């Protein structure tokens, strides 16, 4: 039985995002939350803390821990999340790319700057989706912002570092420096997407998005984003260090991600 409506699928295709309301059960959310606590207690070598020394709160992230955190493994590879990815990408065989933990403690001034995920990754292709799973209420004041339809804009931007919003490089073929706030407004309408535990905010890797800090928010904002790719996605190199910093390990530009790091899920 399908999880999504035709409207959900159309909104994702046209707008580059969709908020799917109350689609995850409490047992799954509790399990993922346990996984987050394990991750915070034992971060990987790829973990980051984006909070400046003179700032309040804490903005923590880490990724690709699903092989040793069972809760992430199970959520990613079975149940509702891969089924949602399958329906949004219109493929019976979604491939899991990685999970990404993002925790903002109360009073964190550090925002998530405007960006699109695609240039950070060492892959090419339009069949993809991030399933952003909130474990705490995310009201309008701290919610994700999207630029509607920006995944279809034929412009790609050099990624900026989250720690200081500086570009990875000043020039790269096929990419341009990230636009100013005024120029961003010309790319489409900005939409704010509050969400509750049980919701999934799905968005395309090329959809421009950001999120404020939690300076005036009294609670944590724990998110795990589960990322999937579909039929047309291929390995590629970038003129900067990718995030996650996957090594080729035998993959060449144009290859399918056909290896154990990126499992196909047969539904």
Image (spheres, helix red, strand yellow):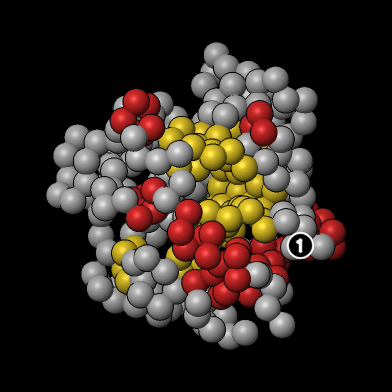
* Residue at x-position 58% and y-position 38%: 192
Q: Position of residue 209 (x, y in %)?
A: 47, 42
Q: Where is residue 234 in the image (x, y as percent from the top left)?
A: 32, 71
- Asked if one can make out residue 117 in the rendered structure from this viewpoint, the answer is no
Badge 1: few (under 14), some or many (20 or more) residues near its Cα, within 10 Å?
some
Question: Looking at the image, which is closer to me, 28 or 240?
Answer: 28
Name the residue furthest top.
Answer: 54
- Asked if one can make out residue 128 in the rendered structure from this viewpoint, the answer is yes
Q: Is 234 situated above or below 146?
A: below
228 left or right of 117 in image:
right
Determine the secondary structure under disc 1. loop
Question: Looking at the image, which is closer to me, 98 or 218?
Answer: 218
Name the residue furthest right.
Answer: 27
> Total marks drawn?
1
* Residue at x-position 39% and y-position 59%: 246
* Residue at x-position 16% and y-position 39%: 171
Name the residue furthest front.
Answer: 7
* Quadrant location of the N terminus in the rendered image: bottom right
* Residue at x-position 54% and y-position 40%: 191
Residue under label 1, please give it: 24
Q: Position of residue 6 (x, y in %)?
A: 60, 71
* Quadrant location of the C terminus in the rendered image: bottom right
Question: Looking at the image, which is closer to me, 146 or 263?
Answer: 146
201 left or right of 139 in image:
left
Q: Where is residue 255 in the image (x, y as percent from the top left)?
A: 29, 76
- Location of residue 198 (image quadrant): bottom right
Q: Is 15 situated above or below 138?
A: below
């Amino acid at each position: 039985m399908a999880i999504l409506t035709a409207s959900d699928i159309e909104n994702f295709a046209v707008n580059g995002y969709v908020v799917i309301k109350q689609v995850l059960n409490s047992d799954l959310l509790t399990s993922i939350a346990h996984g987050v606590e394990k991750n915070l207690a034992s971060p990987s070598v790829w973990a980051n803390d984006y909070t400046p020394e003179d700032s309040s709160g804490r903005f923590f992230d880490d990724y690709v821990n699903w092989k040793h955190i069972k809760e992430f493994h199970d959520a990613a590879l079975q149940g509702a999340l891969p089924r949602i990815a399958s329906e949004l990408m219109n493929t019976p065989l979604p491939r899991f790319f990685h999970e990404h933990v993002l925790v903002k403690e109360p009073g964190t001034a550090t925002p998530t700057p405007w960006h699109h995920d695609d240039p950070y990754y060492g892959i090419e292709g339009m069949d993809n989706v991030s399933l952003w799973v909130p474990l705490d209420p995310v009201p309008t004041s701290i919610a994700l912002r999207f630029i509607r339809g920006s995944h279809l804009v034929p412009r790609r931007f050099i990624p900026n570092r989250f720690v200081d919003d500086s570009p990875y490089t000043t020039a790269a073929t096929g990419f341009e420096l990230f636009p100013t706030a005024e120029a961003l407004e010309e790319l489409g309408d900005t939409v704010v997407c509050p969400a509750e535990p049980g919701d999934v905010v799905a968005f395309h890797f090329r959809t421009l998005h950001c999120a404020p800090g939690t300076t005036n928010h009294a609670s944590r904002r724990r998110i795990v984003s589960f990322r999937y790719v579909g039929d047309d996605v291929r390995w590629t190199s970038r003129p900067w260090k990718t995030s996650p910093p996957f090594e080729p390990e035998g993959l060449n530009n144009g290859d399918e991600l056909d290896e154990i790091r990126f499992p196909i899920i047969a539904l």
